[in-house]
Image (spheres, rainbow, N blue to C red):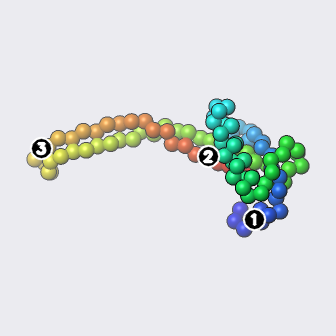
Amino acid sequence: MPGVDFSKYHTYKWIDIEGGAHPNQIVNAEIKQSVDTQLASKGLTKTDSDKADLYVGYQIAVDKEKQWKAWGTGRGFGGGMGSATQSTINVGSFVLDM
């Protein structure tokens, strides 16, 4: 929420969001380590206590989309050469809840 005074929060605890999608163990650890580093730089301390000031959890979503790349030469209807290729790319979203 805009305008929230985060200076009154000092501790946080990781929680799992029910029904939320998570990656494999390695990526999960990397995400949490990155968030831990950022929160520590803001003065927050991670705890396992249920009396934490903040509960932190995340969800991810990865979808596949088709991407087209095309090129061509020539002018108008007079001929020329062209080509198009299709590839599948991953498009992801990451949501951090506090």
Give the residue displayed 28% in from the left and 39% down from the top. 84
Q: Which dot, 3 or 2, sits closer to the camera? A: 2
Q: Quadrant of residue 26?
A: top right
Relative image position of residue 98 (x, y in whole percent) = 74, 52
Q: Which dot, 3 or 1, sits closer to the camera? A: 1
Reading the image, the residue beneath label 3 is 79
Relative image position of residue 28 (x, y in whole percent) = 67, 37
* Kind of residue at disc 1: Val
Question: Gap in Å between the C-alphas at discs 1 and 2?
Answer: 22 Å
Q: Along the line of sight, which residue is nearer the eye, 19 or 15?
A: 15
Reading the image, the residue beneath label 2 is 94
Q: Along the line of sight, which residue is nearer the eye, 26 or 65?
A: 26
Mark 1 nearby-residue class (10 Å; few <14, some 14–19, many ≥20): few
Mark 1 and mark 2 residues within 8 Å of each other at the beta carbon:
no
**Visible residue check, residue 33:** yes
* Kind of residue at disc 3: Gly
Q: Is residue 29 above or below residue 8?
A: above
Q: Is residue 42 above or below residue 78?
A: below
Mark 3 and mark 1 residues within 8 Å of each other at the beta carbon:
no
Relative image position of residue 59 (x, y in whole percent) = 66, 43
Secondary element at image label 2? strand
Relative image position of residue 81 (x, y in whole percent) = 17, 41
Give the residue displayed 72% in from the left and 55% down from the top. 41
Sequence order check: which comes first, mark 3 or mark 2?
3
Mark 3 nearby-residue class (10 Å; few <14, some 14–19, many ≥20): few
Question: Gap in Å between the C-alphas at discs 3 and 1?
Answer: 62 Å
Mark 2 nearby-residue class (10 Å; few <14, some 14–19, many ≥20): few
- Horizontally, residue 55 falls left or right of residue 70, namely right
* Kind of residue at disc 2: Phe
Reading the image, the residue beneath label 1 is 4
Question: Gap in Å between the C-alphas at discs 3 and 2?
Answer: 46 Å
